[in-house]
Image (cartoon, rainbow, N blue to C red):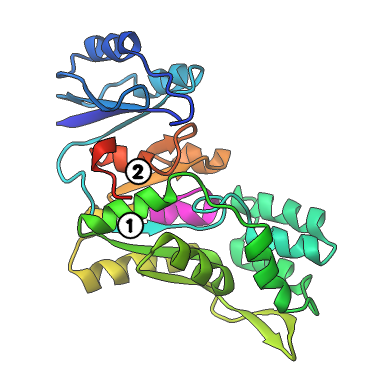
Amino acid sequence: MYTATLLTSPETPVIDRATLESLRNAWGGGEARWLDPGVAAEFALPALPENRWQVWQDLQALKIDLAVTASAGRKKRLLIADMDSTMIRQECIDELADEAGVGEYVAGITARAMNGELEFEDALRERVLLLKDLEEAVIARVVRDRITLMPGGRDLVATMRANGAYTALVSGGFTAFTAAIAATLGFDENRANTLLCEGGRLTGLVAEPILGKQAKVEALDELAARLGVSPAEVIAVGDGANDVPMLKHAGMGVALHAKPRVQAEADIRINHGDLTALLYLQGYTREEFAS
C-alpha cells in the first residue's frame, strides 16, 4: 500500500476539496483525510500510479506538492537534516564571504557546487581560502544578524523528539554555525566542518577530512546503528548535490526547495511546503505538532 500526500505552503492554504477528490477518484484511492485543512491531505493507494510525475508537474502550477510514499513505517525514528538553505534560509559561507568582500564570487561557486557542477570538497577548500584573515569574531555577528530560520523547523524537531525520534543536524557547513542553530532548534546533536583559526583570525583552511556527501551517508549509518534503527527508519532532508546520496539512502529522503539537479534525482520533492511538510509526509496532523 501507498499513501499520496498533497502539500502546500501553510501561508497560502490553496488545496481545496475539489482538487483533492479529483485526484483521489482518478487514482482509485481510499478516503481522503485532512492533516491540516487547505495545507495538507492524504489518501491511501493500492499501487504506485504510473503518471505520478506528470500529476506532480501539473500540481506545481497550482503551488501544490505531491508525494507518494510507502504506507508502512511512515513515522521515522531518526531525522538527519542539512543546515544551509534547509534549516536556515542562507548559505553560511556566502554570508562570511560577503563580510570578507568576496561575497558575489563565493556565492557563484556555492551555487555551482550545490547543483553538482563542482566537487564539494574542492569547492569548499577554495571558498574557505578566500576567507583568510577574516576576524573570527565576525562569525558570531553573522549568526546574530544575518541568519534566519526556515519556517517549520522548530515544529519539525520538537514534534519528532516528542514522539521518540532522535534528531541530528549534519552539515557540510561549519560547526560555529551548526552549534548555534542546533541549540536554537533543539537538535540532539550536530556535525559539520571546522574552520581553523589562529590569533583570532581565520587561517583560510578547514580541518580535514571534510564532511562531504559520503560523510553524510556515514553519519546516517553511524547514528542509525547507535540507535538500533535501520536506514528505512530514517527521514533525511536537504537541498544540495552533496545531500543526494544521503537522501537516497534514507527510508524517506526529502529534497526541500532543492537545486534542479537534486530534484531530478529525488523521489520526494517539496517546492512549496515548509519544513512541516516532513511531518505531514509521516502522517502527523497539525493538532499533533509539538510546540
Residue 47 image offset from top left, x and y in percent: 18, 25
Q: Quarter-wise, where is residue 202 in the image? A: bottom right
The residues colored magenta run 237-247
Which quadrant is the N terminus positioned in? top left
Question: Residues at badges 1 and 2 in contact (C-beta under 8 Å)?
Answer: yes
Q: Horizontally, is 203 left or right of 262 in the view?
A: right
Q: Name the residue under label 2.
A: 278
- Which residue appears at 67% of the width and 57% of the height? 146
- Which residue appears at 20% of the width and 54% of the height? 163
Label 2 secondary element = helix
Q: Quarter-wise, where is residue 277 in the image? A: top left
- Is residue 271 on the magenta stretch? no
Q: Horizontally, is 100 left or right of 256 in the view?
A: right
Q: Looking at the image, which is closer to me, 195 or 218?
A: 195
Amino acid residing under circle 2: Leu
The disc placed on residue 189 is none
Position of 187 relative to 61 (above/below): below
- Is residue 245 on the magenta stretch? yes
Amino acid residing under circle 1: Leu
Q: Mark 1 points at which residue?
A: 79
- Which residue appears at 53% of the width and 52% of the height? 149
Position of 93 relative to 175 (above/below): above
